[in-house]
Image (cartoon, grey):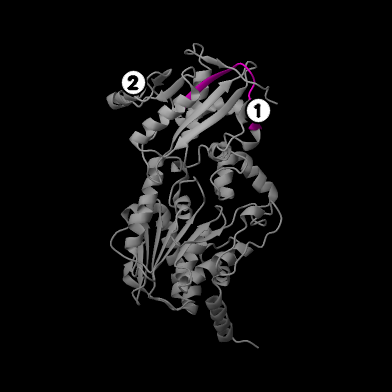
């Protein structure tokens, strides 16, 4: 018969072998009265975090829906597990979030766990009395757990740095907020490590935008292991990782955590959240697979255009050749006698200022002098000067005009989106189709918006009650 000492020894052994089992055992210390509900994804989280602790995964990116214990497992139980079952009371753990209150919440919960009678009976890790605060506490072995808003992450360095939710969901569509988060990721986090060679960074978040921190990591080769677990299984995005893990689900739409999020709850929440939030927060991709404002299935690709279209070429301008810079895009759009909209061509490139002039001139020459064109005029005197210089320079002799943009990008795209939704917008088959559909179906959550901006401008010009010198083009075949 097992003695009390035998039971404690067995629990210590089990917890040392499995972070997920430690979570089960310790749950009651921070969530008294709340029953623990286990699921296979907790095992997956635990296995990957243990691989981080063992030095097998120095950089880990976790994309997982909210409400699935991602913060508790990573930022509460994991640091306590390091100090206790893993036998590393010297470990220094920095838990960061986009705001201090969230980081402090998890710091406090870790402290409650470590100081609980249950934990101390099994792993007597002592917290020093002179360093025991809500935002920072230290063990007698000089390990510590610190909470920090990433903007103020200075001074101390950690063996493990966990950044939980780098950006507030309300700020996800703010370029400034996203750029700030990426700057912190590239400049601040690497400087907070005890040892650049062995210290680990863990990013835990739900996807909010194509250009969020996760998107930046996935777009570049930064050596991050990616654990991605959507709420509903998508076979073409099945997750595999280097430690031998693979998502155990096999059927399209199979749920991640059915006991906590059953089908009726998921469907209820999807209706409230809408397609964008569902795509990011539930499915861990920044836009719906079928499209957001613009759905791929709503575009028909045709092989010819009807006779009598009214044409315009509209542009969205940029002037940089940097890999991460915006593109310059010019969309040729027509309106048929029946009122249908045809996108016939997209000119698009990352160009220098001189390259911009060449692109505009070459495209206008291809369209011909009879096809009117429209370019945006940025606010202020410099914007007016640039527009005047382009129209009197490379566009001289062509039927072009400039005008300021009004409203934000989404507002400008809404009239075109309404036409797309009713199936009134067609694409002429061409090499540019894929890039155009890839971008427009991600809008407004996608990184690039140049083709959408140009298309929105073109549609706006076509719909004006007093068009300018319209060319009614011919055509040899009716579109079918």
Please, what secondary structure does the residue beneath circle 2 have? helix
Q: Which mark is residue 392?
A: 2
Spot occupied by residue 268 in the image (x, y as percentages of width and height): 65, 43
Q: Nearer the viewer, residue 261 or 418?
A: 418
Q: Is residue 360 above or below residue 231?
A: above
Taking the spot 54% from the left edge, 40% from the top edge, the residue there is 435
* Residue span colored magenta: 299-314
Q: Is residue 110 above or below residue 296?
A: below
Q: Nearer the viewer, residue 117 or 167?
A: 167
Q: Which mark is residue 423?
A: 1
Please, what secondary structure does the residue beneath circle 1 have? loop
The C terminus, quarter of image: top right
Evaluate whether residue 116 shows in this view.
Answer: no
Evaluate whether residue 435 shows in this view.
Answer: yes
Measure how far apart labels 1 and 2 are at the Cα level. 38 Å
Q: Is residue 146 above or below residue 412?
A: below
Spot occupied by residue 189 in the image (x, y as percentages of width and height): 36, 59
Q: Which mark is residue 142?
A: none
Sequence order check, earlier mark of 1 and 2: 2
Spot occupied by residue 424 in the image (x, y as percentages of width and height): 64, 25
Is residue 300 rendered magenta in the image? Answer: yes
């Amino acid at each position: 018969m097992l003695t009390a000492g035998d039971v404690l020894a067995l629990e210590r052994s089990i917890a040392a072998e499995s972070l997920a089992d430690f979570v089960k055992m310790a749950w009651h210390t921070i969530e008294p009265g709340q029953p623990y509900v286990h699921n296979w994804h907790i095992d997956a989280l635990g296995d990957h975090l243990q691989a981080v602790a063992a030095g097998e995964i120095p950089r880990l990116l976790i994309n997982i829906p909210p409400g699935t214990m991602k913060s508790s497992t990573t930022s509460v139980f994991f640091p306590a597990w390091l100090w206790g079952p893993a036998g590393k009371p010297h470990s220094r753990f920095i838990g960061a979030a986009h705001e201090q209150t969230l980081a402090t919440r998890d710091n406090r919960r870790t402290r409650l766990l470590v100081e609980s009678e249950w934990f101390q009976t099994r792993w007597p890790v002592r917290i020093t009395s002179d360093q025991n605060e809500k935002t920072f506490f230290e063990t007698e072995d000089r390990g510590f757990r610190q909470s920090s808003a990433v903007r103020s992450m200075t001074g101390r360095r950690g063996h493990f740095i966990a950044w939980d939710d780098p950006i507030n969901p309300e700020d996800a569509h703010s370029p400034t907020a996203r750029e700030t988060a990426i700057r912190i990721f590239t400049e601040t986090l690497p400087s907070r490590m005890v040892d650049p060679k062995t210290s680990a960074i863990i990013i835990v978040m739900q996807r909010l935008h194509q250009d969020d921190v996760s998107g930046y990591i996935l777009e570049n080769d930064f050596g991050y292991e990616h654990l991605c677990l959507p709420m509903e299984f998508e076979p073409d995005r099945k997750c595999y990782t280097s430690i031998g893990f693979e998502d155990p689900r096999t059927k399209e739409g199979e749920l991640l955590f059915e006991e906590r999020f059953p089908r009726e709850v998921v469907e209820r929440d999807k209706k409230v959240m809408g397609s964008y939030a569902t795509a990011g927060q539930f499915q861990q991709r920044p836009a719906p697979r079928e499209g957001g404002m613009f759905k791929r299935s709503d575009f028909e690709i045709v092989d010819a255009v009807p006779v009598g279209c009214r044409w315009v070429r509209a542009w969205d301008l940029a002037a940089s050749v940097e890999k991460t810079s915006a593109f310059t895009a010019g969309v040729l759009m027509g309106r048929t006698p029946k009122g249908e909209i045809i996108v016939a061509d997209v000119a698009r490139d990352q160009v220098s200022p001189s390259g911009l002039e060449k692109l505009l001139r070459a495209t206008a020459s291809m369209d011909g002098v009879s096809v009117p064109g429209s370019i945006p005029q940025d606010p202020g005197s410099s914007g007016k000067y640039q527009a005047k210089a382009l129209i009197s320079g490379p566009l001289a002799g062509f039927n072009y005009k400039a005008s300021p943009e009004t409203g934000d990008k989404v507002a400008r795209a809404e009239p075109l989106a309404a036409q797309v939704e009713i199936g009134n917008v067609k694409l002429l088959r061409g090499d540019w189709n894929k890039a155009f559909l890839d971008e427009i179906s991600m809008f407004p959550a996608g990184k690039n918006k140049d083709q959408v901006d140009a298309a929105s401008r073109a549609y706006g010009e076509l719909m004006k009650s007093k068009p300018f010198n319209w060319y009614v083009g011919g055509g040899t075949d009716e579109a079918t």
